Amino acid sequence: MIIAIDGTTSSGKGTLARRLAELYRLPHLDTGLLYRGLAALALREGCDLTAAESCADLAPRLDLKEFAERELRGARIGAAASVVASHGPVRRALFALQRDFARRPGGAVLDGRDIGTVIAPEAEAKFWVDADVTVRAGRRFRELRALGEPVTEEGVLAQLRERDARDAGRKDAPMKPADDAFSVDTTHMDPDQVMGAALSRLAALGLSAQFP
Ligand code: C5P
């Protein structure tokens, strides 16, 4: 079974993906990390982030183990990732890896922006996770502070708005819910409530977790 989880930054989609993968005992791919890794590689190599082909050419050399997760999760790389991810050649260069992961025997959980629409449109369960932008900015602000980054809440809000607009407005694989995605608005929900909503949906689809 493939579970596709798409949504905006700091909506809670990553936490939901991890928890569902654990419960269903499926491998999980956080596809945002691929774009973050490629952006980190491009910055390290001094590559122009707006040069689509040069960034795409780096994809075969991407090895996420070369970067500390703390660095990849930071604000600078997040903003750079959204620029790199707007290039069609970059998305095509990272397509096969994501597609192969989704098609693993037994299935997988993937989270990102275009999983239900482009990477795995055949997914048995699709979720779209979103929340009010000011609530997401507050969550992201606390995450970045915990990483030791000197951010302000207003700055994080402005960055999120910019990133949302770029992700939703790009020509190739724009961030959007699949037509058959189940939407979860996490504005007033904690992670347990989000998980509960997802499990209800999975049960309604006849996809409850089965254990021998
Ligand atoms: O989800 P995360 O914030 O780690 O993603 C970083 C950036 O990578 C996003 O802002 C988006 O531009 C890009 N991304 C994407 N498609 C995906 C996952 C992430 O375009 N499937």
Image: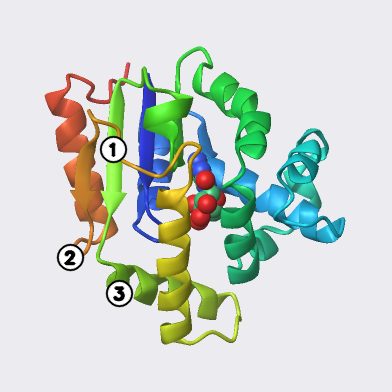
Q: Secondary structure at mark 3?
A: helix
Q: Quadrant of the N terminus?
A: top left
- The quadrant where residue 5 appears: top left
What residue occupies the far top of the structure in this picture? Answer: 105
Quarter residue 99 falls in: top right
Dividing the image into 4 quarters, which one contains the C terminus? top left
The circle drawn on residue 188 is 2
Front disc: 3 or 1: 3
How packed is label 2: few (under 14 Cα within 10 Å), some, or many (20 or more)? few
Q: Which residue is nearer to you in this view: 13 or 38?
A: 38
Q: Which mark is residue 127?
A: 1
Q: Residue at x 42, y 50 (%)?
A: 169
Q: How many marks?
A: 3
Q: Is residue 2 above or below residue 53?
A: above
Identify residue for label 3.
134
What residue sits 24% from the left and 30% below the top?
179
- Alpha carbons under labels 3 and 1: distance apart: 21 Å
Q: Residue at 34% x, 68% y: name it.
A: 136
